[in-house]
Amino acid sequence: MAERVDYQGDGIGLVDDKGRCAIPASLRQALAANSPRADGKDGGTVIVGVHPKQTCLRAYDPAYVAILKAQLDAREALHTGEDGEPNYNFKRRGASGEAVPFDGSGRFIMPGFPRDYAGIEETAFFWGTMDWIEIWDPKTLMAATDVDPVMQAACRYHCKQKGIVL
């Protein structure tokens, strides 16, 4: 793979009772470029896990795992105790994720625990953050006090376009 494509874009996905949802087109294109299937068909693999700080999900391509691991290794090294023992929670929080396939239309199944943790039921808001995609329950995002208001405004916009009442 050449240079990684950044995750930029946003949108709403409807979630069915089995957790199936479609990644919005702008983000799906970047994800497919970063994780092409070996057989050349549309789709690929997305890793979905809980966000290490927010009550939402974080999704990324398999190649990002090496970047994430290097970041976590560096952070762990900076926070080694006087006895040489690392703070194991950095990797515990940062390594959450389950690889799931997505098809050419961006449909994938959100893993059960992460979806439950984030409170995602019928609607999922997707937001590209360059390195990964955040997936939020819209009501949780609207109640959050430590997120960018532009992201909240985008979520309100997309919900309004789909007739979703917040």
Image (cartoon, rainbow, N blue to C red):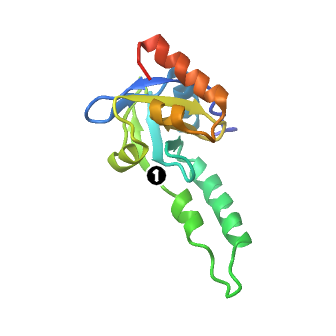
Residue indicated by mark 1: 97
Farthest bottom residue in view: 83
On-image quarter of the C terminus: top left
Q: Residue at the spot x=55%, y=26% of the render? A: 29
Q: Seen in the image, is 10 located left or right of residue 78?
A: left
Residue 153 in the image: state x and y as whole percent.
60, 22
Residue 66 visible in the picture: yes
Q: Seen in the image, is 31 located left or right of residue 113?
A: right
Q: Residue at the spot x=29%, y=29% of the render? A: 16
On-image quarter of the N terminus: top right
Q: Residue at the spot x=47%, y=23% of the render? A: 12
Depth check: 34 or 92 in front?
92
Residue 52 in the image: state x and y as whole percent.
55, 53
Residue 23 in the image: state x and y as whole percent.
46, 28
Total labels: the figure holds 1
Q: Dot 1: what SS?
A: loop
Q: Residue at the spot x=68%, y=81% of the render? A: 81
Seen in the picture, residue 111 relative to 137 is either above or below; the reply is: below
Seen in the picture, residue 163 relative to 130 is either above or below; the reply is: above
Q: Seen in the image, is 42 located left or right of residue 19?
A: right
Seen in the picture, residue 38 relative to 107 is either above or below; the reply is: below
| Residue type, label 1 | Gly
Residue 155 in the image: state x and y as whole percent.
54, 24
Residue 40 visible in the picture: no
